[in-house]
Amino acid sequence: MSAPLHLYLHVPFCVRRCTFCNQKIYPATPETCKAYANALLAELEATAPDFSGDPVQTVYWGGGSPTALSQDDFARIMRRIRELFSLSADTEVTVEALPNRVDASWMVAFQNTGVNRLVLGLATARIPELERIGSANNMPSSETSLILPQLFHLPGYEATLLYGIPGQTAANFATSLRFAVKYKVSALRLDPLTLPKGVEETVCRDEVPAMLDYAARHLTEKGYHEYLPGRWAKPGQECRDLLARQSTENYLSFGPGTTTRVDGDLSRTTENIAVYTLHPQEPELLYKPVTGA
């Protein structure tokens, strides 16, 4: 009997690491990204037969930065996913993207491959804060990334904003929030910036409650609702992938350092990207059960 299915594809590459990023990411080069795309395809092909006919509800590309892949490799993987799994017109297909990587050619690639949702990592709409966190974003690219989804009639696009940036005040955060809302994003993610030891004293921690209080008031006034902690959306624009992660439905994750859930059992993929790239179809090397979950 078929069961709802969700797919997550991890791309652990970025053009450059932000100052306070604590994710396991690697420099994006054409050679490493090509080899990784081939490994993802191989893992997808090895996994798919066990889930033939299961209706795929969501596909989520996360990272890192999925747009570190070439558009050709991205399209190649999306085509193969549609051949291997049972997607429908209702399947939510989401891609995380940095504003400085979103342009018209990528929007065409998203359209051609059935992507219907973007998560744009704005972080902040203030230049001093972008510089403080070492982000490659800038205001022109942030504005462009919020305008293009409207021009290309993308059904959903959301912005991620950070609070707790060193030196950030409640008024600063409110400016960034209003900036995102002005461009009619369908959803927002409000995430705390995780800081390494020794940086905490530069953060205005007493400002954080005021930031979140303003966000709750302003977003409610603008027609958003909080469907998960720190996750706001217009009605019907909730991220179904995020909701699936909270459920017991089968959730297949592809790529190193990811967790898969099948029939309630969890398994973890190796974090060793070299092992993953060289042995994407050898489960004894890739996966370990998660115990005590």
Image (cartoon, rainbow, N blue to C red):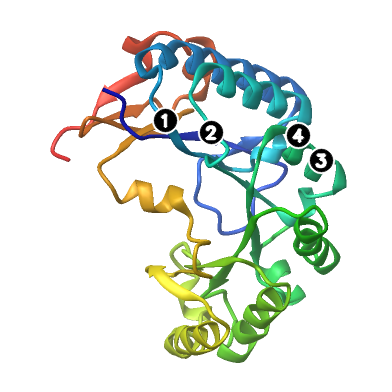
Q: Is residue 168 left or right of residue 273?
A: right
Instruction: Report crowding for label 2: few under 14, some 14 to 19, many 20 or more residues within 10 A (C-alpha).
Output: few
Amino acid type at image mark 1: Pro
Q: Are marks 1 and 3 in contact (CB under 8 Å)?
A: no
Q: Give the answer, above or below, for where 77 lies relative to 175.
A: above
Q: Secondary structure at mark 2?
A: loop
Instruction: Identify the residue at image location x=83%, y=61%.
Output: 144
Front residue of 255 and 168: 255
Disc 1/disc 3 C-alpha distance (Å): 26 Å
Q: Position of residue 151 (x, y in %)?
A: 83, 58
- Mark 1 or mark 3, earlier in chain: 1
Amino acid type at image mark 2: Ser
Disc 4/disc 1 C-alpha distance (Å): 21 Å
Residue beneath label 1, please?
A: 55
Amino acid type at image mark 4: Asn
Disc 3/disc 2 C-alpha distance (Å): 20 Å
- Mark 2 or mark 4, earlier in chain: 2
Residue beneath label 4, please?
A: 112
Instruction: Report crowding for label 1: few under 14, some 14 to 19, many 20 or more residues within 10 A (C-alpha).
Output: some
Quadrant assignment, res 13: top right
Residue beneath label 3, please?
A: 108
Residue beneath label 2, please?
A: 88
Of marks 3 and 2, the one in the foreground: 2
Front residue of 147 and 132: 147
Instruction: Identify the residue at image location x=67%, y=73%.
Output: 180
Q: Are marks 4 and 3 in contact (CB under 8 Å)?
A: yes
Of marks 1 and 3, the one in the foreground: 1
Front residue of 248 and 209: 248
- Mark 3 or mark 2, earlier in chain: 2
Instruction: Identify the residue at image location x=66%, y=71%.
Output: 124
Q: Are marks 2 and 1 in contact (CB under 8 Å)?
A: yes
